Image: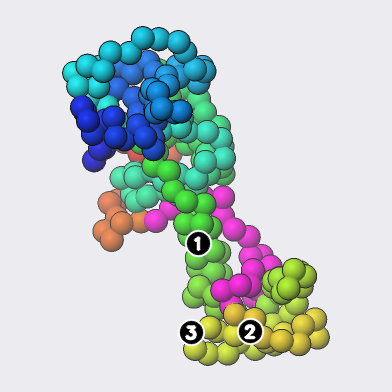
Amino acid sequence: MTKVYTGFEALERMKTHWIQKEDTPFNKYRFEEGVVKVKNLKTDHYIETTININLFFNNTFVDYVEPLAVGDTVKVDIISGTLYGEVDRFLEEYGVQCFRFKGNSNPYKVSSAIRIEKDELAALKRKATFENAGRMVDEFRKGDIVKFKVAGYEYKAEVMQQGRGNDKMVEFRTAYAGLVPARDITPVKFVTFVDATDPDYVKVAPCTAPPLPRMGQHIMNTKEIF
């Protein structure tokens, strides 16, 4: 639930964050250099205006959030699970502002997107990379081709064997004489000749997934878009 501020709480919040009116916002507000500064939401430029302190007592405010941009990492809840990925482009569908994930041509409402950290997406993509090859996360086998960095140098090597334990240390053939934790190794090609390619986006299904739509059913006819 979005945190709402009013009165003294709104004034206090402005010391550290930009805030905007909860309803019909045109500007954002923040304390800077001991005074309230105002920026127009459309232009993001400072504007000169007279502010009555009652503005903050007669209205409710929320934190200003930067608009979604290409390259942002987000997640969207849909009927059959949750999609995680990177924003690739924006478009308008039936008068609604939408975006597309990188690697996914389906439109999703901008308002349904929730920002996530890039590290979270990277971890999900790594998990999917191993699962697509029938492996557990960080499971390497003799003959896998991998890459890793040690002391600033990047190596590409063939796995000779993988140890056990929490660190899952991996030993290599010829290229590097030491041991490297599996979590610090990027797979290039698994010994089963499956290319270790990160997916563009990841879909995580709920515990109980609903029936899949019939073949040929157009995405615009489902509730997954919005």
Q: Tell me the amino acid under the disc marked 2.
A: Val
Residue 106 within the segment the image draws in magenta:
no
**157 and 56: which one is in front?**
56
Residue type beneath disc 1: Ala
Residue 111 seen in the figure = no
Look at the picture and state if 195 lies above or below 105: below
Cα distance between the residues tagged 1 and 2: 19 Å
Q: For residue 190: magenta?
A: yes
Q: Which residues are magenta?
A: 182-204
Residue in the image at 65% along x and 88% along y: 161
Residue 151 image label: none
In primary-sequence order, the first of circles 3 and 1 is 1
- Residue marked by disc 1: 123
Q: Residue 222 placed where, x, y %?
A: 34, 35
Q: Say if 169 sits above or below 26 in the image.
A: below
Residue drawn at (43%, 39%) of the image: 216
Q: Quadrant of the C terminus?
A: top left
**Residue matched to label 3:** 166
Q: In the displayed image of the protein, which residue is found farthest to the right?
A: 174
Percent x, y for residue 121? Answer: 49, 54
Q: Could you tell me which secondary element the residue under label 2 belongs to? A: strand
Residue named by callout 2: 170
Viewer-closest of 5 and 161: 5
